Image (spheres, rainbow, N blue to C red):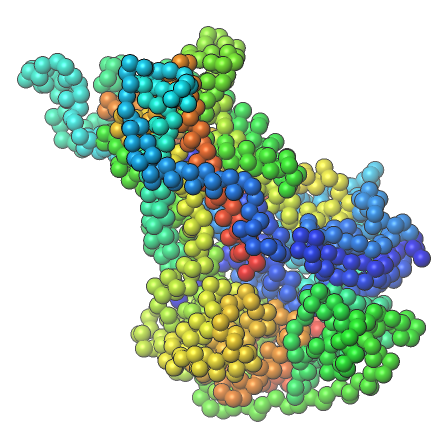
């Protein structure tokens, strides 16, 4: 299993930091964050430039078939004779951008719904929260499987379904952050100055919760990466034969005895990128948290 | 040197290795068995860190050095002895009754947890509860079922469970109402005397220290300024800082023409490492004060002072005579509240149970009460941040009971008539915006020109430099933030300023500055004020008329002199008796 | 302008971010807000950003605000809520399946010739010529009487198919949860107690990696290492007899547990650290409670967040079994769901959706009951801190 698929994520406070930081944050970033950033840069480069780096990643060599690591194929080939390393690089092109779309999409929806829900309260809040409650009471992965499976699967559909299933979490995070700000005197002082609700929400409240929403994008990104890979693994995401990591895993899941790298490479890629995103997200959250405390 | 049953601290220094900062240094004191010492200081003085370091309970990331002996044993380099001594030899009572007890454990068990091995909880717990004046059945309750005062008593019982010979109390009553504070302090002192414990009290309140302890030690910016017997220090202060601190604390029995404020704010320890920490704010400073760091030295028997000029300080000026508050105004009121009622969902008791009140133009009306009296709800109803269940709020003749039903013009009118300042200086300003942006927006909202020059003028009118416009709130002290909040509120020269505990989160010296600023603005803008506070001394200084609230009702009203000099309601008398006056008899 | 609902005043009662104000609160008025407005109401955010983050999964708000009204009302409310969700799910699934591209008829016909006779037979058998609402009601009527219908794909009764496969999925979930709790909670506690040291850095990193690892990837990696290379565990199959069964299910359960361990490490570590930073812990130390006693206080008080995490772990596992059953080719509910969905086997998908929704609702209900037992403030007072 994994935590994931209920839609609720372990977005726990990281840890309580004592005040009194001397050096700027980026200088004190731990090694793990540096490594994570490196992984993300590699993944981003692969996602952006794989058509040029590995133009013939999906070229088959049926004569060769599946083979272990050897000359010309550092990680061997799969049963269609495709180079595993090339597939790994090419796989980033579907795995990473799709997940980013989900994260950004759910952040946008979350902000658009959470900001008014938290600030205006009343029926707006009730409506938004009932919707969120409903989605929360469903197992997200199962819903995604049923919807994507029934509608025939596909990359765009998977992304759209995940945005719908993810956005309640962002909505709650944003709403919670807004509620925390809403009765602070600076907001009430703005009300006393007869500013419009829209202006208070966008100019006063939002800048103070934006860091929370932003840090959340990274955590959602990681979760989306894993969820998209899961759907692809079940054959409900990208089209068959594409080099996506989840799909490659699925295509080769019976082949690991012949060449274990066919599953190790994409499996570790998913884990490494998701872990890197989580590490960076946690670290950002911690920074935001420390800043919130220091004020 | 190190006595049995007491504490001796020599040359205590606390550092934060991660940043290289020193937070306090050269702190020495001792407390004999049966004796009580008050460590007094404003925030940033290092008083809490001093006792935490003494007890070996510093927060993570801080290191202490210096000699500490407890009960005749040197413990600063011996964590095991320290651990063994906790509870049985030395015990600590903490500040916040809402957080110091384990929320999920019945209080009886929590007290029993601290009993020495072999003690019988069934008899000891009721005995301890009785000692702190609580009935035995409290043992079966959870902390959330008790009031703040009861929790603090439970905390005391728990601290006493191990039978300590030294009790340290860190601001034990700061979070409590004045009347509860007096009861709890009287209890602590009685038990301390009965048990013959050595007692260290941390407090920000000099008068409270005089009334509660045998000796006082005044700290500032992480070092000792002055120490001596309570009565002796009360009568004659040998350090200008002590004088300033005492003078800045307004009296409750008369109104001063001017509250002697201390300019500036408390510096960091390291910023003043090589000079007298108070020199920059001291009216008696000479150039020599900036050249060396004076140590606390004996001036006369039992008295130490860290002032270079301790021996030659001029005599203290005679107490300033009181002045009369403003004459009653008879014009049509700018604010008229009629039978205001409000009950919060889930609360059995109404927050406001029918309060009527008027404020005339230019008049300052004080509303005093303890927590739960409804005074904050009252302010919020007037400001339109809360909607009353019943009753009317007439602002300059407009019925503002429900802002949702007013026309846009009426709302704008009401907003320009009344503005508000809030208690917490740390959240009163938007942390994401510069001061200049905040004030420019306020000026525009009030229909005033908002060019940089106008913002600068506004800043100067509240005693801030025009450069402040470029900074964000994080770069300002609490007092400065409160000044900006005031500037924001008066940008459009409102006819009524609602002040909700505007100085209660500030240090005394800063409090005096803010009160002076409010008095000046009131004069200049001929603005009426609705001044909400729990502090009778403060309200004495600012208000013309007074309303005393108790549990959502107004129990007494009248000119401030009349109410405070000749209170007619018993509740008002209780409140008055709870204001520390510095006399040894105050605790009764 | 709307200041009516005061339960949103979370920063008033917060314990974290206002420490500095409180310290500066020389006048003692800083508590005004808290006490004057009555309760330090629940959840929505306990002030710090940390609280906000936690509020998302914890949904403490409506879960705990019941109190006083007793168990009857609480249960009734929860059952009604579950009924609404189940109804919505069944309508949703039904509608979705019939609106999907490619008709059921087409699927059923498969390669057979589409003669009018066969089409008519199929339509009659599966009521395909009835209007949609009628078909839904027909299905609903059957379901309420306990008749879940017949699988379109296999022709066997849905109840039997589910009955055959449910034990495996439940066993897998239970086994996985057990592994996760036995590993995750102690690791989280170790990390919190040794905060900032090597142990802690290791558990935190391991937790994040676990949290980031999807079960199918973990499953395949486990197969490569433990089945293919080391040969300690079987590659496929479910085994005969209890011991063999456990042996066969160990790798799948471990694959499920890895993510759950990550979550439990994170929740229990964060919860325990938060408790260890509380005043009451300092106070307990100051009056002489030993390390074990203080840890017991803090552990006991971190139970609610750990319970929350455990609930999420179980519900997450119910969903995650889909991936693991496919990975290990196990005949459980998950693989049944995947097969049925792609075949548009309406009765099976419907029944599975309902069953899983009910199971998840039951787990959430258990967690809520657990809250009440763990926190007397919920039990006696109706509010949580």
The percent position of residue B533, horizontal first and vertical second, equals 59, 73
The percent position of residue C262, horizontal first and vertical second, equals 52, 33
Whether C153 is drawn above or below A273: the answer is above
Instruction: Work out which residue is located at the far front of the displayed protein and give it.
Output: A71
Instruction: Work out which residue is located at the far left of the displayed protein and give it.
Output: C116
* Residue A200, quarter of the rendered image: bottom left
Is there any visible trace of residue C143 in the rendered image?
no
Q: Name the image quarter holding the N terminus of chain C.
A: bottom left
Instruction: Work out which residue is located at the far top of the displayed protein and give it.
Output: C240
* Residue B502, quarter of the rendered image: bottom right
Whether C279 is drawn above or below B180: the answer is above
The percent position of residue A4, horizontal first and vertical second, equals 42, 34
At a point 65% along the width and 76% down the height, the residue shown is B264
The percent position of residue B380, horizontal first and vertical second, equals 48, 70
At a point 71% along the width and 71% down the height, the residue shown is B578
Q: Nearer the viewer, residue C61 or A152?
A: A152
């Amino acid at each position: 299993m994994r935590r994931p698929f209920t839609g609720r994520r372990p977005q726990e406070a990281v840890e309580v930091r004592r005040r009194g930081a001397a050096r700027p944050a980026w200088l004190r970033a731990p090694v793990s964050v540096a490594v994570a950033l490196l992984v993300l840069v590699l993944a981003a480069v692969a996602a952006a430039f794989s058509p040029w780096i590995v133009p013939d990643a999906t070229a088959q060599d049926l004569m060769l078939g599946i083979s272990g690591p050897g000359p010309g194929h550092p990680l061997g080939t799969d049963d269609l004779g495709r180079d595993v390393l090339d597939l790994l690089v090419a796989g980033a092109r579907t795995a990473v951008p799709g997940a980013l779309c989900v994260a950004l999409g759910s952040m946008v929806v979350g902000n658009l719904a959470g900001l008014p829900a938290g600030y205006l309260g009343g029926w707006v809040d009730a409506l938004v929260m009932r919707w969120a409650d409903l989605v929360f009471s469903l197992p997200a992965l199962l819903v995604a499987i049923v919807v994507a499976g029934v509608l025939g699967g596909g990359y765009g559909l998977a992304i759209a379904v995940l945005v719908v299933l993810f956005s309640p979490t962002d909505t709650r995070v944003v709403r919670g952050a807004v509620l925390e700000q809403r009765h602070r005197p600076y907001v009430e002082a703005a009300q006393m100055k007869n500013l419009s609700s829209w202006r208070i929400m966008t100019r006063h409240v939002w800048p103070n919760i934006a860091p929370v929403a932003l840090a959340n994008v990274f955590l959602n990104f990681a979760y989306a990466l894993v969820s998209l890979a899961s759907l692809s693994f079940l054959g409900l995401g990208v089209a068959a034969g594409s080099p996506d990591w989840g799909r490659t895993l699925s295509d080769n899941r019976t082949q690991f005895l012949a060449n274990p790298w066919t599953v190790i490479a994409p499996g570790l890629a998913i884990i490494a990128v998701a872990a890197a995103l989580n590490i960076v997200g946690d670290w950002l959250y911690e920074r935001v948290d420390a800043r919130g405390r220091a004020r | 040197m190190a006595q049995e049953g007491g504490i001796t601290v020599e040359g205590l220094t606390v550092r934060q290795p991660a940043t290289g900062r020193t937070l306090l240094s050269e702190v020495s004191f001792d407390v004999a068995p049966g004796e009580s010492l008050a460590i007094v200081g404003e925030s940033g003085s290092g008083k809490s860190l001093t006792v935490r370091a003494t007890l070996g309970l510093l927060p993570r990331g801080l290191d202490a050095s210096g000699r500490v002996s407890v009960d005749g044993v040197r413990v600063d380099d011996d964590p095991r002895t320290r651990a063994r001594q906790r509870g049985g030899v030395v015990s600590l009572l903490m500040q916040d009754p809402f957080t110091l007890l384990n929320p999920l454990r019945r209080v009886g068990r929590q007290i029993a947890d601290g009993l020495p091995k072999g003690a019988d909880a069934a008899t000891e717990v009721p005995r301890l509860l009785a000692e702190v004046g609580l009935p035995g059945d409290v043992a079966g309750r959870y902390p959330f079922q008790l009031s703040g005062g009861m929790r603090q008593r439970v905390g005391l019982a728990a601290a006493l469970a191990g039978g300590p010979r030294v009790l340290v109390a860190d601001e034990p009553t700061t979070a409590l109402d004045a009347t509860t504070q007096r009861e709890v302090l009287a209890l602590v002192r009685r038990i301390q005397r009965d048990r013959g414990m050595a007692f260290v009290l941390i407090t920000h309140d000099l008068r409270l220290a005089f009334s509660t302890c045998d000796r006082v030690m005044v700290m500032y910016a992480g070092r000792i300024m002055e120490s001596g017997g309570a009565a002796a220090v009360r009568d004659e202060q040998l350090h200008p800082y002590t004088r300033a601190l005492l003078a800045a604390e307004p009296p409750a029995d008369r109104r001063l023409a001017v509250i002697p404020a201390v300019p500036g704010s408390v510096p960091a320890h390291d910023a003043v490492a090589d000079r007298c920490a108070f020199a920059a704010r001291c009216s008696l400073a000479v150039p020599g004060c900036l050249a060396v760091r004076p140590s606390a030295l004996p001036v006369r028997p039992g008295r130490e002072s860290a002032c270079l000029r301790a021996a030659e300080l001029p005599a203290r000026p005679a107490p300033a005579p009181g002045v009369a508050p403003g004459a009653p105004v008879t014009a049509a009121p700018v604010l008229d509240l009629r039978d205001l009622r409000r009950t919060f969902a889930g609360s059995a008791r109404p927050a406001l149970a029918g309060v009527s009140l008027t404020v005339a133009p230019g008049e300052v009306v004080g509303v005093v009460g303890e927590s739960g009296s409804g005074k904050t709800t009252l302010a919020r109803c007037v400001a339109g941040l809360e909607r009353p269940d019943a009753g009317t709020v007439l602002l300059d003749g407009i019925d503002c009971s429900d802002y949702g039903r007013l026309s846009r013009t009426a709302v704008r009118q009401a907003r320009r008539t009344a503005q508000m300042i809030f208690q917490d200086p740390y959240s009163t300003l938007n942390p994401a915006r510069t001061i200049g942006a905040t004030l420019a927006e306020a000026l525009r909202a009030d229909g005033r020109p908002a060019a940089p020059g106008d913002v600068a003028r506004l800043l100067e009118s509240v005693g801030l430099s025009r450069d402040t416009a470029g900074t964000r709130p994080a770069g300002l002290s609490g007092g400065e933030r409160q000044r900006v909040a005031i500037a924001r509120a008066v940008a459009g020269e409102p006819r009524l300023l609602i002040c909700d505990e505007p100085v209660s989160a500030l240090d005394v010296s800063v409090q005096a500055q803010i009160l002076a600023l409010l008095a000046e603005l009131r004069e200049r803008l001929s603005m009426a004020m609705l001044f909400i506070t729990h502090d009778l001394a403060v309200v004495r200084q600012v208000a013309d008329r007074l309303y005393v609230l108790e549990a959502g009702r107004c129990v007494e009203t009248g000119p401030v002199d009349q109410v405070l000099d000749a209170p007619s309601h018993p509740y008002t008398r209780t409140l008055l008796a709870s204001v520390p006056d510095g006399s040894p008899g105050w605790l009764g | 302008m709307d200041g009516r609902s005061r339960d949103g005043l979370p920063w008033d009662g917060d314990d974290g971010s206002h420490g500095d104000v409180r310290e500066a609160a020389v006048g003692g008025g800083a508590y005004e807000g808290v006490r004057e407005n009555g309760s330090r109401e629940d959840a929505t955010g306990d002030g710090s950003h940390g609280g906000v983050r936690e509020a998302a999964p914890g949904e403490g708000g409506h879960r705990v605000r019941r109190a006083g009204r007793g168990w009857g009302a609480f249960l009734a409310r929860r059952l009604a809520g579950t009924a609404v969700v189940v109804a919505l799910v069944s309508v949703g699934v039904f509608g979705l399946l019939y609106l999907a591209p490619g008709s059921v008829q087409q699927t059923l016909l498969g390669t057979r010739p589409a003669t009018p006779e066969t089409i008519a037979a199929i339509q009659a058998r599966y009521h395909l010529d009835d209007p949609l609402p009628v078909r839904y009601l027909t299905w609903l009527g059957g379901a309420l009487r306990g008749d879940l219908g017949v699988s379109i794909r296999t022709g066997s009764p849905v109840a039997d198919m589910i009955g055959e496969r449910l034990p495996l999925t439940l066993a897998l979930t239970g086994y996985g949860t057990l592994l996760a709790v036995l590993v995750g909670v102690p690791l989280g506690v170790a990390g919190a107690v040794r905060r900032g040291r090597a142990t802690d850095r290791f558990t935190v990193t391991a937790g994040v990696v676990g949290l980031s690892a999807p079960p199918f990837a973990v499953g395949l990696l486990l197969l490569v290492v433990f089945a293919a290379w080391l040969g300690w565990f079987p590659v496929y199959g479910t085994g005969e007899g209890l011991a063999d069964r456990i042996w066969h299910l160990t790798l799948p359960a471990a694959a499920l547990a890895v993510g759950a361990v990550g979550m439990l490490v994170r929740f229990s570590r964060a919860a325990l650290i938060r408790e260890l930073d509380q005043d009451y812990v300092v106070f307990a130390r100051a009056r002489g409670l030993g390390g074990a006693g203080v840890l017991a206080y803090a552990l006991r008080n971190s139970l609610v967040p750990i319970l929350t995490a455990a609930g999420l772990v179980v519900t997450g596992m119910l969903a995650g079994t889909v991936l693991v059953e496919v990975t290990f080719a196990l005949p459980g509910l998950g693989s049944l769901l995947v097969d049925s969905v792609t075949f548009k086997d309406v009765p099976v998908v419907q029944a599975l959706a309902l069953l899983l929704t009910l199971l998840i609702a039951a787990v959430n209900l258990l967690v809520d009951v657990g809250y009440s037992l763990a926190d007397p403030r919920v039990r006696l007072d109706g509010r949580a801190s």
